[in-house]
Amino acid sequence: SSAMSSRFSSRPATGLSTLARRWGLAWGLVLLAMSSTAATGVPLGGAEHFAILARGAISNTPASSITGNVGSASGVDGFQPLTADSSGEFFTSPQIDGRLYRGTDNAEPTPTMLASALDDMDTAYTDAASRAHSLPSSQYVDVMAGSIGGLTFVPGVY
């Protein structure tokens, strides 16, 4: 079972769309957490434990309210204040209802766990990108022109 919910609410829209652009999601595909047991679900592996997961740095401008874990292989900016857990494995922030993992700044097993989750993210992307869409592209490409604040998405590929 996943620690994350199978639904994701974005708040605020500008924060999420800015993050999406800065995460390197220019490839235009956002994978929202979904159960790997669903008939049409994309298996996320270790990536399912993250609301936001990126190989590059994550910038939180303007401030966001994020439900779930955040992971970056290279760093984060704008999640202030960050408080290191006594184990050294993760950070907390008032803007995140979950844990923040920075592979370069956390003790093992975090770097190994992040590397595995990032590999799983790449595999999930390849799987999702190869799937045919039954909807008109206007319903899954550039949803609401990135203005998705306050909307709740069901699991799927957008």
Image (cartoon, helix red, strand yellow):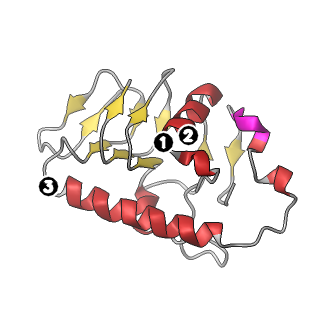
Q: Position of residue 121 (x, y in %)?
A: 45, 62
Q: Mark 1–mark 2 contact, CB under 8 Å?
A: yes
Q: Position of residue 116 (x, y in %)?
A: 32, 65
Rendered position, 68 above or below 44: above
Q: Position of residue 95 (x, y in %)?
A: 42, 28
Give left or right: position of 76 versus 141. Answer: left
**Residue nearer the viewer, 107 or 69:** 107
Q: Amino acid at mark 2?
A: Ala
Alpha carbon of mark 3 to alpha carbon of mark 2: how far?
Answer: 27 Å
Residue placed under numbered mark 3 in the picture? 108
Q: Could you tell me which residue is drawn at 56 percent across and 37 percent down?
A: 21
Q: Position of residue 38 (x, y in %)?
A: 62, 74
Give the magenta part as a residue range.
Answer: 144-148
Mark drawn on residue 23: 1
| Camera-side mark, 3 or 2 | 2
**Residue nearer the viewer, 142 or 64:** 142
Between discs 3 and 1, the one toward the N terminus: 1
Q: Could you tell me which residue is drawn at 56 percent across and 76 percent down?
A: 37
Rendered position, 23 above or below 30: above
Give left or right: position of 141 versus 14. Answer: right
Rendered position, 44 above or below 58: below
Question: Is residue 2 something one can see in this rendering?
Answer: no
Alpha carbon of mark 3 to alpha carbon of mark 1: how far?
Answer: 24 Å
Alpha carbon of mark 1 to alpha carbon of mark 2: how far?
Answer: 5 Å
Q: Amino acid at mark 3?
A: Glu
Where does the N terminus fall, quadrant-wise?
A: bottom left
Q: Amino acid at mark 1?
A: Trp
How packed mark 2 is, by other alpha carbons closer than 10 Å (few <14, some 14-19, many 20 or more), is: many
Magenta region, main secondary structure: helix
Mark drawn on residue 20: 2
